[in-house]
Protein backbone atom coordinates (compact mmCIF):
# COMPACT_ATOMS: atom_id res chain seq x y z
CA UNK A 1 0.00 0.00 0.00
CA UNK A 2 1.18 3.50 -0.84
CA UNK A 3 0.11 6.55 1.19
CA UNK A 4 -1.44 9.22 -1.00
CA UNK A 5 -2.88 12.60 -0.21
CA UNK A 6 -5.91 13.89 -2.08
CA UNK A 7 -6.95 17.55 -2.14
CA UNK A 8 -10.71 18.13 -2.11
CA UNK A 9 -12.37 21.38 -3.11
CA UNK A 10 -15.84 22.63 -4.06
CA UNK A 11 -17.67 25.94 -4.32
CA UNK A 12 -20.96 25.08 -6.09
CA UNK A 13 -24.15 23.21 -5.15
CA UNK A 14 -23.69 23.01 -1.37
CA UNK A 15 -19.90 22.61 -1.25
CA UNK A 16 -19.81 21.24 2.30
CA UNK A 17 -22.13 18.43 1.26
CA UNK A 18 -20.14 17.90 -1.95
CA UNK A 19 -17.02 17.23 0.14
CA UNK A 20 -18.88 14.95 2.54
CA UNK A 21 -20.22 12.98 -0.44
CA UNK A 22 -16.71 12.81 -1.96
CA UNK A 23 -15.29 11.45 1.31
CA UNK A 24 -18.00 8.77 1.32
CA UNK A 25 -17.11 7.92 -2.31
CA UNK A 26 -13.38 7.71 -1.47
CA UNK A 27 -14.21 5.10 1.18
CA UNK A 28 -15.69 2.93 -1.59
CA UNK A 29 -12.75 3.01 -4.03
CA UNK A 30 -11.53 -0.53 -4.69
CA UNK A 31 -7.99 -1.35 -3.52
CA UNK A 32 -7.90 1.78 -1.36
CA UNK A 33 -8.35 2.52 2.32
CA UNK A 34 -9.31 5.99 3.52
CA UNK A 35 -7.06 6.68 6.51
CA UNK A 36 -8.03 10.19 7.61
CA UNK A 37 -9.63 13.43 6.45
CA UNK A 38 -8.60 16.88 7.61
CA UNK A 39 -11.06 19.44 8.85
CA UNK A 40 -13.03 21.34 6.23
CA UNK A 41 -11.68 24.82 5.53
CA UNK A 42 -13.23 27.86 3.91
CA UNK A 43 -10.96 29.65 1.44
CA UNK A 44 -11.04 32.47 -1.07
CA UNK A 45 -11.12 31.40 -4.73
CA UNK A 46 -7.97 31.33 -6.83
CA UNK A 47 -8.18 33.16 -10.12
CA UNK A 48 -11.51 34.88 -10.84
CA UNK A 49 -12.89 36.45 -7.67
CA UNK A 50 -16.48 36.67 -8.96
CA UNK A 51 -17.29 33.19 -7.69
CA UNK A 52 -18.28 31.72 -4.30
CA UNK A 53 -15.70 30.88 -1.65
CA UNK A 54 -14.42 27.30 -1.57
CA UNK A 55 -14.59 24.52 0.94
CA UNK A 56 -11.34 22.52 1.00
CA UNK A 57 -9.93 19.48 2.77
CA UNK A 58 -7.21 16.87 2.36
CA UNK A 59 -7.66 13.10 2.64
CA UNK A 60 -4.99 10.50 3.41
CA UNK A 61 -5.55 7.34 1.40
CA UNK A 62 -3.58 4.10 1.24
CA UNK A 63 -3.80 2.48 -2.17
CA UNK A 64 -2.65 -0.46 -4.23
CA UNK A 65 -3.74 1.33 -7.43
CA UNK A 66 -1.19 2.72 -9.87
CA UNK A 67 -1.15 6.53 -9.98
CA UNK A 68 -3.13 6.92 -13.20
CA UNK A 69 -5.65 4.27 -12.11
CA UNK A 70 -6.19 6.27 -8.93
CA UNK A 71 -6.56 9.43 -11.02
CA UNK A 72 -9.24 7.64 -13.08
CA UNK A 73 -11.14 6.84 -9.87
CA UNK A 74 -10.89 10.44 -8.66
CA UNK A 75 -12.15 11.79 -11.97
CA UNK A 76 -15.03 9.30 -11.92
CA UNK A 77 -16.08 10.59 -8.48
CA UNK A 78 -15.89 14.18 -9.79
CA UNK A 79 -18.11 13.25 -12.74
CA UNK A 80 -20.62 11.46 -10.53
CA UNK A 81 -20.95 14.68 -8.54
CA UNK A 82 -21.59 16.81 -11.60
CA UNK A 83 -18.10 18.11 -12.37
CA UNK A 84 -17.90 19.63 -15.82
CA UNK A 85 -14.40 20.29 -17.08
CA UNK A 86 -14.15 23.64 -18.84
CA UNK A 87 -11.35 25.55 -20.50
CA UNK A 88 -11.51 28.16 -17.74
CA UNK A 89 -8.84 27.43 -15.15
CA UNK A 90 -9.69 28.03 -11.49
CA UNK A 91 -13.37 28.56 -12.21
CA UNK A 92 -16.26 27.45 -10.01
CA UNK A 93 -16.87 23.71 -9.65
CA UNK A 94 -19.00 21.17 -7.87
CA UNK A 95 -15.96 19.09 -6.93
CA UNK A 96 -12.24 19.04 -7.54
CA UNK A 97 -10.14 16.06 -6.43
CA UNK A 98 -6.39 16.50 -6.86
CA UNK A 99 -3.80 13.78 -6.35
CA UNK A 100 -1.32 15.82 -4.30
CA UNK A 101 1.20 13.16 -3.31
CA UNK A 102 1.66 9.51 -4.24
CA UNK A 103 4.08 8.15 -1.66
CA UNK A 104 7.43 9.82 -2.23
CA UNK A 105 7.20 9.45 -6.00
CA UNK A 106 7.73 12.17 -8.57
CA UNK A 107 5.44 11.66 -11.57
CA UNK A 108 5.32 13.77 -14.70
CA UNK A 109 3.17 12.35 -17.48
CA UNK A 110 0.80 13.94 -19.95
CA UNK A 111 -2.12 13.31 -17.56
CA UNK A 112 -0.54 13.61 -14.15
CA UNK A 113 2.01 15.68 -12.26
CA UNK A 114 2.85 14.60 -8.70
CA UNK A 115 3.59 16.26 -6.40
CA UNK A 116 0.74 18.49 -7.51
CA UNK A 117 2.28 21.45 -9.33
CA UNK A 118 0.74 24.19 -7.17
CA UNK A 119 0.59 22.63 -3.74
CA UNK A 120 3.63 24.47 -2.31
CA UNK A 121 1.88 27.84 -2.68
CA UNK A 122 -1.67 26.94 -1.70
CA UNK A 123 -2.71 27.56 1.88
CA UNK A 124 -5.91 25.56 1.33
CA UNK A 125 -3.73 22.50 0.64
CA UNK A 126 -0.84 23.03 3.06
CA UNK A 127 -2.76 23.74 6.26
CA UNK A 128 -5.20 20.79 5.94
CA UNK A 129 -2.28 18.54 4.90
CA UNK A 130 -0.34 19.65 7.97
CA UNK A 131 -3.31 18.63 10.11
CA UNK A 132 -2.89 15.05 8.80
CA UNK A 133 0.89 14.80 8.47
CA UNK A 134 2.70 17.53 10.47
CA UNK A 135 6.15 15.99 9.96
CA UNK A 136 5.72 15.38 6.22
CA UNK A 137 8.65 15.97 3.91
CA UNK A 138 7.86 16.35 0.20
CA UNK A 139 9.69 14.24 -2.40
CA UNK A 140 11.87 17.28 -3.21
CA UNK A 141 13.15 17.32 0.39
CA UNK A 142 11.17 20.39 1.51
CA UNK A 143 9.41 19.98 4.84
CA UNK A 144 5.78 20.89 5.18
CA UNK A 145 6.65 22.93 8.27
CA UNK A 146 9.08 25.10 6.30
CA UNK A 147 6.37 25.82 3.70
CA UNK A 148 3.91 26.88 6.41
CA UNK A 149 6.46 29.46 7.58
CA UNK A 150 6.29 31.25 4.22
CA UNK A 151 2.69 30.63 3.05
CA UNK A 152 0.20 32.82 4.94
CA UNK A 153 -3.24 31.53 5.92
CA UNK A 154 -4.79 34.12 3.58
CA UNK A 155 -8.18 34.14 5.32
CA UNK A 156 -8.41 30.36 5.62
CA UNK A 157 -11.03 29.41 8.22
CA UNK A 158 -11.93 26.08 9.77
CA UNK A 159 -15.57 25.25 9.03
CA UNK A 160 -15.83 21.70 10.36
Image: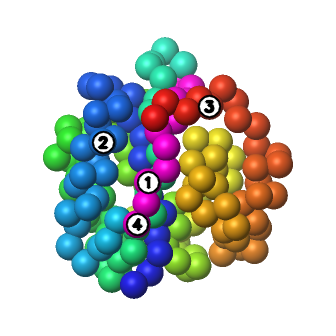
Identified at 83% across, 48% down, the residue is: 149
- Whether 63 is drawn above or below 44: the answer is below
Identified at 29% across, 37% down, the residue is: 18
Q: Is residue 81 visible?
A: yes
Circle 4/circle 3 CB separation < 8 Å = no
Measuring from the top left, give residue 109's x and y in whole percent.
46, 72
Q: Residues within 10 Å of mark 1 (few under 14, many from 20)?
A: many
Earlier-in-chain disc, 4 versus 3? 4
* Numbered tag placed on residue 20 in the rendering: 2
Circle 4/circle 2 CB separation < 8 Å = no
Marks 1/4: CA distance? 7 Å
Residue nearest the observer in this picture, 100 or 2: 2
Residue 151 sits in which quadrant?
top right
- Whether 98 is drawn above or below 104: the answer is above
User: Tag 1's secondary structure?
Assistant: strand
Residue 145 sits in which quadrant?
bottom right
Earlier-in-chain disc, 3 versus 2? 2
Report which residue position mark 4 lands on: 35
Q: Residues within 10 Å of mark 4 (few under 14, many from 20)?
A: some
Residue 134 is left or right of residue 53, and the answer is: right
Marks 3/2: CA distance? 19 Å
Earlier-in-chain disc, 2 versus 1? 2
Identified at 76% across, 37% down, the residue is: 152
Report which residue position mark 3 lands on: 156
Earlier-in-chain disc, 1 versus 3? 1
Q: Is residue 110 visible?
A: no
* Numbered tag placed on residue 37 in the rendering: 1
Marks 1/3: CA distance? 17 Å
Marks 2/1: CA distance? 10 Å
Marks 4/3: CA distance? 24 Å
Q: Which residues are magenta?
A: 35-48
Amino acid sequence: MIRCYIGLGANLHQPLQQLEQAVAALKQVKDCELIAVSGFYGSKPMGPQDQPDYVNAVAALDTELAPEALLDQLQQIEQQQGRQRKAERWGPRTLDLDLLLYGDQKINTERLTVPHYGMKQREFVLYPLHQLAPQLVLPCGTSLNSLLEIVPENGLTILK
